[in-house]
Amino acid sequence: MSRSDRLIRLMQVMRRLPSPVTARRLAVEMEISERSIYRDIQSLRNSGAIIDGEAGYGYTLGEDPFLPPMQFDGDEVDALTLGLISVMEIGDEDLQFAAENAFAKLEAILPEALRPRMRFPATAAKSFRRKLASNIDLTPLRQSIWEERAIFFHYVTAEGKPSKRKVWPLAIVFLDTVQVLVGWCCLRENFRTFRLDRIKKLDFLDESFRPKRVGLLRDYFQQEKDKGCEN
């Protein structure tokens, strides 16, 4: 990792961790020595970052010159905060970490008057229902969705019957207690949803279905909307 990349990463770590954060904690997060942390803190200060504190007391990131100013009103901040908190609550591990980073970045660029709306939000999201465990790593699955690559997996139906499916993955939907994959089933030649906790083995194929995802996803949601109107 280059020194410039390390400084950018250090800024993000300082945005994310509760303040004041000690050099020892930063060193653990960055996997470098405390001496390097001291040097990097000084480099950031020389570049214009407002960092309060010193060795032995911990550091607090004040004004952040590395992120551009953005204009949000109070309700917009409340909406963004609720959305990020929801992801921290229901998302998989990688999405939770991404939400924490996004939360820290957003708080860093807000005017001081709006920051309490994120630190002490008026709205919150909490789920008390037990989520069914899934052995599927969602990060490569999301990548497959974005790259529009087919997948193959072993599946167990609600009746306990095993099956094998080749699917064009379109989206992952987080429901109250389960996560489902929306996809185009190549076996049934139709849209299907698959609970991730019932997928027992997942393989990523080289087969591409680009550029069909957007159109298929639009058709799926329109189909679901039409079903709702019929009811």
Image (cartoon, helix red, strand yellow):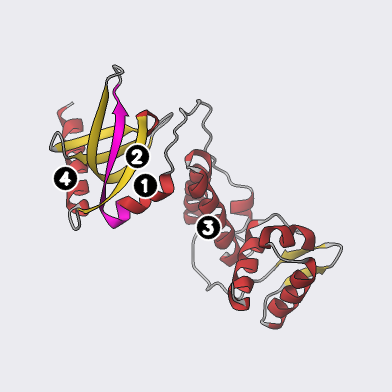
Q: Is residue 84 left or right of residue 62?
A: left
Q: Residues within 10 Å of mark 1 (few under 14, many from 20)?
A: many
**Region in magenta:** 145-157
Residue at the limit of the structure toward the right, as seen here? 56
Q: Secondary structure at mark 2?
A: strand
Q: Nearer the viewer, mark 1 or mark 3?
A: 1
Give the total of numbered labels: 4
Q: Is residue 34 left or right of residue 208?
A: right
Q: Position of residue 160 (x, y in %)?
A: 31, 18
Res 75 visible: yes
Residue 192 lies left or right of residue 124; in this view the side is: left
Can the viewer see residue 22?
no
Which residue, given by chain and number where applicable, does mark 2 sit on? 202
* Residue drawn where x is 55% and y is 51% of the image: 97
Residue 162 vertical position relative to residue 86 in the rendered view, above or below? above
Earlier residue among tags 1 and 3:
3
Marked residue nearer the N-terminal end (1 or 2): 1
Disc 2 or 3, which lies upstream in sequence?
3
Q: Is disc 3 surrounded by few (<14), some (14 to 19) or many (20+) residues within 10 Å?
A: some
> Where residue 219 is drawn, which disc sits there?
4
Amino acid type, mark 3: Ala
The kind of residue on which mark 2 rests is Leu
Marks 4 and 3, how far apart in space?
31 Å
